[in-house]
Image (cartoon, rainbow, N blue to C red):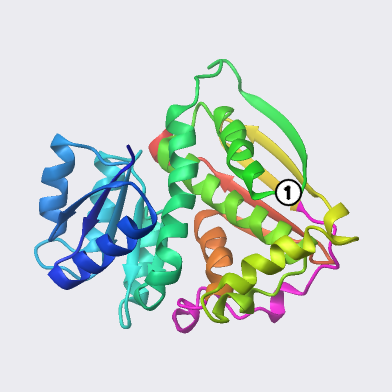
Amino acid sequence: MTSVLVVDDSAVDRKLISALLLKQTNWKLDVCENGLKALEFIENRMPDLVISDMRMPEMDGFQLVTKMRQLYPVVPVVIITSQGSEEMAMEALRKGASSYCPKSRMSRDLVSISRSILSVSLQRRHSQKVLSRITKSQISFCLENEGSLIAPTIEHLQSHMTAWDETDRLRIGVALDESLLNAMHHGNLEVDSRLRDVGDGSAYEQEIVKKNQIKPFCDRRVKVDAEISETCIKLFVKDEGPGYTPDLIADPTNTENLGKPSGRGLLLIRTFMNSVTYNESGNEIRMVKHRSKESN
């Protein structure tokens, strides 16, 4: 059974997060009231995922993320952001957090974010080992607009990254997951991300299903090209939609935009990858990640 550790100094928030997760999953949940107690817990029983608040006594979420990267790099951490903690959240992403969820959007997004991170993380941890002699790979995919194809695509790419540490593999997986979702939903299917804020957000998912049954949207594909070496990975994700102008999108790294759903994926991509550029028509994202010193 999937195990999740919730870390928050507020008993009310611990109950709220636990209730949200238990309502929609069958995961096993444990709770701790600060980072120090979380590390003591993990030393004896390692969870599959940690969900942590940022502001806590004794050891806050930022310090916990730093320690987790050092001691337990295979365990992803999702941080909960609140008004006033945006700068700290950005730094936590840079230091090793796998994703974030604004407290104001927990009821809508926390379960889906956690499932996405777990999918990437567990696929890697449970996959078979590949030949350690692989030093360079070039891989290409042509994907339909089906979300079920994303996790195995990422797992296959990660299996070729034998020289990379778990944190780098997970971050690359998260960035690729977000870029593939963007290419499928916003590029090929041309679904407006603002639909996520309509009602309970179901209009967004309904539009995806609808567009996937209508030409020309359903015939469009996502092409993925990857160049993997021991020190660098280059990823090219191209959709067959009309493209867009990236400069017109609100800067997701601006803390004022941290809680907006439309910029979350781009923020994670830019935070986790060393270089992010686009082609002229805006329908191909080009990402580069250099292997961290921790992997050497």
Q: Would you place residue 272 above or below residue 234 in this image? A: below
Q: What x and y, as percent, mark residue 6?
A: 23, 56
Q: Nearer the viewer, residue 278 or 265?
A: 265
Q: Is residue 292 visible?
A: no
Give the quarter of the image for residue 101.
bottom left
Q: Would you place residue 9 above or below residue 72 in this image? A: below
- Give the residue displayed 27% in from the left and 53% down from the top: 66
Q: Horizontally, is 57 left or right of 141 in the view? A: left
- Give the residue displayed 51% in from the left and 61% down from the top: 268
User: Which residue extends farthest right?
Assistant: 216
Q: Please state the extent of the stretch shown in magenta in the rendering.
A: 238-260
Q: Horizontally, is 104 left or right of 204 in the view? A: left
Q: What x and y, as percent, mark residue 33?
A: 12, 61
Quarter occupied by the N terminus: top left
Q: Horizontally, is 12 left or right of 154 in the view? A: left
Say which amino acid is labelled 1: Phe
Label 1: state its secondary structure.
Answer: strand
Q: What x and y, as percent, mark residue 250?
A: 61, 81
Q: Is residue 244 magenta?
A: yes
Circle 1 is placed at which residue position?
236
- Give the residue displayed 16% in from the left and 68% down from the top: 56
Q: Nearer the viewer, residue 3 or 160?
A: 3
Q: Nearer the viewer, residue 276 or 204?
A: 204
Q: Is residue 131 magenta?
A: no
Q: Mostly what secondary structure, the magenta segment?
A: loop
Q: What x and y, as percent, mark residue 42?
A: 18, 41
- Give the residue displayed 61% in from the left and 23% down from the top: 135
Callout 1 crowding tier (Cα within 10 Å): few <14, some 14–19, many ≥20 = many
Quarter occupied by the C terminus: top left
